[in-house]
Image (spheres, coloured by chain):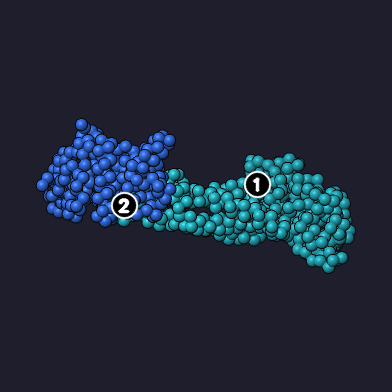
Amino acid sequence: MSTKLMMKQVTQTYGDGDSTLSVLNNLDFEVQEGEFVAVLGPSGSGKSTFLSAAGALLTPTSGEIYIDGESIIQKDKTQLTELRLHKIGFMFQSAQLLPYLKVEEQLLYVARLAKLNAKEARQRAADLLKRLEISGKRNQYPEQLSGGEKQRVAIARAWMNNPAILFADEPTASLDYRRGREVVRMIADEVKKERKAAVMVTHDERMLEWCDRVLHLENGKLVEK
Amino acid sequence: MFLALREMRHAKARYLLIMVIMLLVSFLVLFVTGLAKGLAYANISAVENMPANYFVVQEDADHTFRRSQMTVQDLQTAKSVAGDANAASLAVQTSTVTAAENKLKVDVTYFAVDMEGMLAPRITEGKAVTNDQRGNVIVDRKLAESGIVVGSKLYDQATGLAWTVAGYTEDSSYSHTPVVYMNNTDWQAMRTGGGQGKTSAESVPYNVIALHGSSEQAHTITETLDQVEVITQKEAVSSIPGYSAEQSSLMMMIVFLFVISAFVLAVFFYVITIQKTSQFGILKAMGTRMSYLAWSVVGQVLLLSVVSLSISLLLTFAMNAALPDSMPFQLEPSTLILTGCLFIGTSLVGSLISVGRVAKIDALEAIGRAYA
């Protein structure tokens, strides 16, 4: 069992002088292989900042972050981009698929970025789309898909490059209850099947059924309740 | 280019529209360039086609041929410096001729040259004129459009002298008028009034001396001769009445068209880029390298400008073929290549603004945003 994400004493401060605001305050967090963790918190609690730091989108003010055993602190922008490409899968609010790519191309695009072999990439894309029950729509544009279908494509895209860990930013925000649950279940399935890890940030407490651990972001720290 | 091409495929109408604008602008650029070149050629081809790289003119003549006066002694000096075959006298006069049979009046420019020297016209039809022959001239083929054929008689309106057209030469215009070449004997006769009596060739001055030589030789001539100036062929051409004014106004149009096309493209791509800010954020968050995104933007601009330029080239060729010969229009491959490269170059410079904008977008844009 390996640690996919480790955050040690991570602090993120905004502003300067008297008006500093610590959004993350000596935060410790670990995610093991096969684990699906939910992070809950009301809006304004720093969920976005937490996700940005964990997902190597910003370098925190202080602290250490390891993704799949690799420290991100000393890396420059280009190296972080490379790291995100190979080690991290992202799911965004309202899926954020590229409007001009067909479903299959959304997956092939990230494979191209990672310079995956074209034939293998096509095979993997087909497998993923099949597992997520969306292969029938592989030649359609996002505008022709429903919200749930879009998020399923987003899951497939996030897993495409075989990342160590998946970060999901409010993946159910634009979905109704039933579809939201389905999407969360599918994320959980993939985590177990591929022996990966996932962190989901959400404010919706009804979506936690499939999660292994539930943490709350309070005062810049993650606490279990 | 994976993204660039697919984006264009998806938003066909949008990119088609901008391509049509580019197409029209580049077509206009090519057309006005061709027109400028054609007009220039119709204006000064007689001087431009001379195998001379320098002209000796009088110092106070302001580079203008007709104001300058050179003597036979000057010519001798020039010949002794540059060599007999590399210096030739040229006399220029604008006039009107009538061709009686068809009651025709045409403005022409007389060029009096040594018919055995370097300025002798190249005959494309008819017979050459020797230095001793009287009453024979070589005319620019453009006069053929007015109905003047080999054997026609031309009457000078001012003096009443008559010449027979012995042959045609091509591409010989001066100040937008066709050139009539005569030998120095006829020139003397005309200048001394009707040709009665004997006149010595020395008595009537020339306007300028055409020179084919090195810059050292040009320098020597300036030193040796009193009150003369040696100007380059380029300077001579730009001093031809009307040439500079005509060319600079057309040049201004061309420059503006380039600037406009660069701006239109730059603004179009800038607006599109701003519209896609969150998309670029997502792409960066997913691990897309900046170089990839930059190439994506530049690639689109390159593709658009190359395709629209190619189509407008085809249009220009088609129009060139359809235009009547009397329309002054000329595009040489070298001009085409230069114009095309400039067009694509300015487009690319315009696209750099968008690239700069994309570079500034932070991957953080991707997190916590509900809408694309």
Q: Residue at x 21, y 45 (%)?
A: A210
Check the residue under mark 2 and report the chain it is in: A
Q: Can residue B126 be seen by looking at this rendering?
A: yes
Indicate the position of residue A49 as horizontal and vertical percent values: 21, 48
Of residues B251 and B242, the one drawn nearer to the viewer in this rendering: B251
**Amino acid type for the residue under numbered disc 2:** Gly
Of residues A179 and A172, the one drawn nearer to the viewer in this rendering: A179
Residue that badge 2 annotates: A148
Number of the label disc, if any, that sits on residue B199: none
The answer to whether A165 is drawn above or below residue B111 in the figure is above
Q: Residue at x 76, y 52 (%)?
A: B170
Q: Chain A rendered in what hue? A: blue
A9 displayed left or right of B64: left
B89 displayed left or right of B355: right
- Is the N terminus of chain B in the top left, top right, bottom left or bottom right quadrant? top left
Furthest residue in direction bottom, as rendered: B103
**Amino acid type for the residue under numbered disc 1:** Thr
Q: Nearer the viewer, mark 2 or mark 1?
A: 2
**Is disc 1 surrounded by few (<14), some (14 to 19) or many (20+) residues within 10 Å?**
some
Number of the label disc, if any, that sits on residue B222: 1
Check the residue under mark 1 and report the chain it is in: B
Q: Residue at x 42, y 50 (%)?
A: A140
Dot 2 falls on a residue whose secondary structure is: helix
Label 2 in the same subunit as label 1: no
Indicate the position of residue B267 as horizontal and vertical percent values: 43, 57
**Which chain shows up in cyan?**
B
